[in-house]
Image: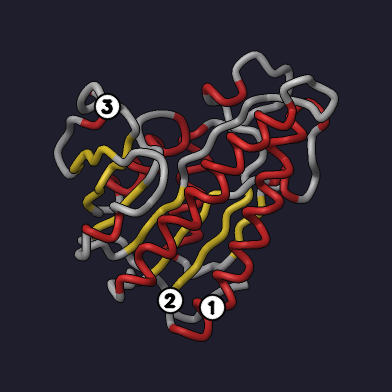
Amino acid sequence: MTDPHIHPLDGKRVLVTGSQRGLGLALVEALLGRGASVYAGHRSPDGIPAVLDRPGVIPLYLPLGGEHTASFPDVDYVVNNAGVNRNVSFDAINAVDALRAELDVNVLGTLAVVSAYLASGRRPAGFINIVSALAFDPNYFCSTYSASKAALHSICLSLRDFGAQQGVYVLNAYPTAIDTRLTAGMPIPKLAAADVAERIVQAWEDGMDELRFA
């Protein structure tokens, strides 16, 4: 589905969570290429990651949770990208702990960011949410991660409905496996992070509200 209003990114200010590697870093680079400036959220307490020390990027230390994100009121768009994958199946002895950790970041972390902005009254023009194709087609080998993404999908659908009523743009993206640290060692087909980022940013500029890769 396509929104009749396009969303040019030139000159816009975008917050990207989980931006220091993988798809997050690729999104930062794609946004810079569109003329946007980027608040690059990272979780490195030891200092600014070297990859984020570049023109057009303002690195932000964002610990788990989103309670601090709304202190940046000049943000036009928020990209909820931060996520973890423990690569655990349901029959593993640590399955419950893995799911708790994945829910904490993938679901509660995204919800914390969104609710912090909406509750503060500093609503950005839109939210771009990185979900996963595993929300629809779970993988046994990372079944707890798949479950967390299914929960995130439900929240993002509700957010999209809210946005349609309140004039807040929402794009939910569902990439298949990406060649990043999260999928290291998994013998499956993988997409290049730069290609995924480019498709997401193009769908965003085109005003799409959903992007599926499979």
Residue at image coords 78%, 20%: 93
Q: Which residue lies furthest to the top in this view?
A: 185
Q: In this view, does 54 lie to the left or right of 163?
A: left
Q: Decide which of 199, 87 is in the foreground and name it.
A: 87
Q: Distance between the residues labelled 2 and 1?
A: 8 Å
User: Which residue is found at the position 72% from the left and 40% from the top?
Assistant: 146
Which residue does the image show at 36% across and 44% down from the upper left?
A: 30
Give the quadrant of the N terminus: bottom right
In this picture the colour scheme is secondary structure
Which badge, 2 or 3, comes first in the chain's sequence? 3
Q: Position of residue 163 (x, y in %)?
A: 50, 77
Tell me how far mark 2 sits from mark 3, CA to CA.
32 Å
Mark linked to residue 162: 1
User: Looking at the rendering, which quadrant does residue 205 occupy?
Assistant: bottom left
**Foreground residue, 181 or 119?**
119
Neighbour tally class for label 2: few under 14, some 14-19, many 20 plus, Cα within 10 Å: some
Name the outermost residue toward the left: 55
The residue to which callout 3 is attached is 45
Q: SS for tag 3?
A: loop
Task: State the image coordinates of residue 76 (x, y, percent, origin top left).
Answer: 28, 65
Assess whether mark 1 and mark 2 are in contact (beta carbons under 8 angstroms).
yes
Residue 140, percent from left and from top: 83, 30
Residue 168 marker? 2
Secondary structure of the residue carrying tag 2 is loop
For the residue carrying disc 3, how many other residues have a C-alpha within 10 Å: few (<14), some (14-19), or many (20+)? Answer: few
Mark 3 and mark 1: span between their CA atoms? 34 Å
Image location of residue 164, percent across then percent down = 53, 81
Which mark lies nearer to you, 2 or 3?
A: 3
Of the residues under marks 2 and 1, which one precedes in the sequence? 1
User: On residue 8, which mark appears?
Assistant: none
